[in-house]
Amino acid sequence: MSSDQQETTTTVDGSGTTTMRATTAATTTTTTFSSQRLRINPNNEHRPESYEDLKLDFPSAVYSSLEKYLPQQILVSTRDDKVKFMTDIMLRHLPHGERSRAQRHSVYRQKIITNYQPLHKELYTLAPMQCFVPSFIKAINESSEKSFRSIISEPSPGVFVFDMLQPSFCEMMLAEVENFEKWVGETKFRIMRPNTMNKYGAVLDDFGLDSMLDKLMESFIRPMTKVFFSDVGGATLDSHHGFVVEYGKDRDLDLGFHVDDSEVTLNVCLGNQFVGGELFFRGTRCERHVNTTTKPDEIYDYSHVPGQAVLHRGRHRHGARATTSGHRVNMLLWCRSSVFRELKSHQKEFSSWCGECFCEKKEEKGRALDALRQKLVKAVSAPQA
Ligand SMILES: O=C(O)CCC(=O)C(=O)O
Ligand SMILES: [Fe+2]
């Protein structure tokens, strides 16, 4: 739609706190090891522990890779002590503003988690058979491009659609969100909304669903993004922002044209009955080209179906049309890769996945070929001495 093309794209920010997870460790600024420093050279012989089962301030993979830099005295201490020591170091190295924001956010989550009573406890640990449809589980178990392609359609380049959630899981999730909102209403607790563009919805990570969503990303989404989105860090996704958005009467109406603060976004419709709410996609763009015009073949509109998932690059420009009646709730997982972000900060120009960079590169190649052709023609037609 031309009206979409004229709009300026907004980068939606997930309140900036999402790589930090809830823990009490954030407030630990002095430990008995405070005088100890990291080693300059890693101890490559050391086999790091797994931290995946813990609620941590930073991605568990970061703890595992930092471990080989620990001084000997800490390396032989308990896992809890190692976590304290590493968290302390990482927090100290965050810029001041970010550190205090991380600590405030940690306290905020802790308050919710200690006071909110979950309705469906079983949602908080991922049980694949209860959560996913059999075709999805089968494809993930086989974990090959062929098995993924057998359940996925790609109606427009870079937009992948597949059946994912069981109806009973969607219902439980809807009930849990409703229960959380009821608690928020009764206690008058002021909650943070999922991002800068929504007035409604809730951050699932903030009320205890963070480790379940971590498992979802690591074991079920990353195998697919490794295949389909390796150019934007799909193989190295290591943190997420998980939330629900809500549209309809007394909720948000629509969502403007934007790009997400993610490398890859998983968007699954939980239900319920609604009219409208289509997602409109308008091509993938890097920061430099985010407001360039849409090409006709980049226009694609998708109608949400409960239980069905859409997977796309965060930089794929999109928005959601008005939900004109009923109530629509979608679960979103903005998946991020710290490795990709670090590499991108050193890369200045061409991005292979940007529609506009791609065209610029093609035109540049065309011009170089033309110049070469002209040079050759001149050389051949020049009179011989
Ligand atoms: O409403 C939708 O389905 C889209 C939500 C979305 O794009 C977002 O929250 O980033
Ligand atoms: Fe989005």
Image (cartoon, rainbow, N blue to C red):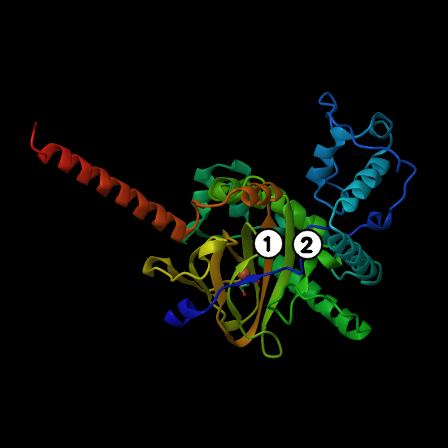
Residue for badge 2: 18
Q: Residue 188, image x and y in percent? A: 79, 74
**Ligand 1 - quadrant of the structure image:** bottom right
Name which residue lies at 89% across and 35% down.
33
Circle 2: is it few (<14), some (14-19), or many (20+) Cα within 10 Å? many
Indicate which disc, 1 or 2, sits on the residue closer to the N terminus: 2
Residue 138, visible in the rendered structure: no
Q: Secondary structure at mark 2?
A: loop
* Left/right of residue 296 with respect to residue 334 in the rendered view: left
Residue 131, visible in the rendered structure: yes
* Left/right of residue 84 with respect to residue 231 in the rendered view: right
Q: Nearer the viewer, mark 1 or mark 2?
A: 2
- Tell me which amino acid carries mark 1: Trp
Question: Dots 1 and 2: beta carbons under 8 Å?
Answer: yes
Circle 1: is it few (<14), some (14-19), or many (20+) Cα within 10 Å? many
Name which residue lies at 35% across and 46% down.
361
Up the image or down, 341 lies above or below 319; here it is above
Q: Residue 252, image x and y in percent? A: 59, 74
As measured in the structure, the alpha-carbon distance from the residue carrying label 1 to the one carrying label 2 is 10 Å
Q: Residue 245, image x and y in percent? A: 61, 66
- Tell me which amino acid carries mark 2: Thr
Pick whichever, 282 or 242, lies toward us: 282
Mark 1 residue's CB less than 8 Å from ligand 1: yes
Q: Secondary structure at mark 1?
A: strand
- Number of numbered discs overlaid on the protein picture: 2
- The disc placed on residue 334 is 1
Q: Quadrant of the N terminus?
A: bottom left
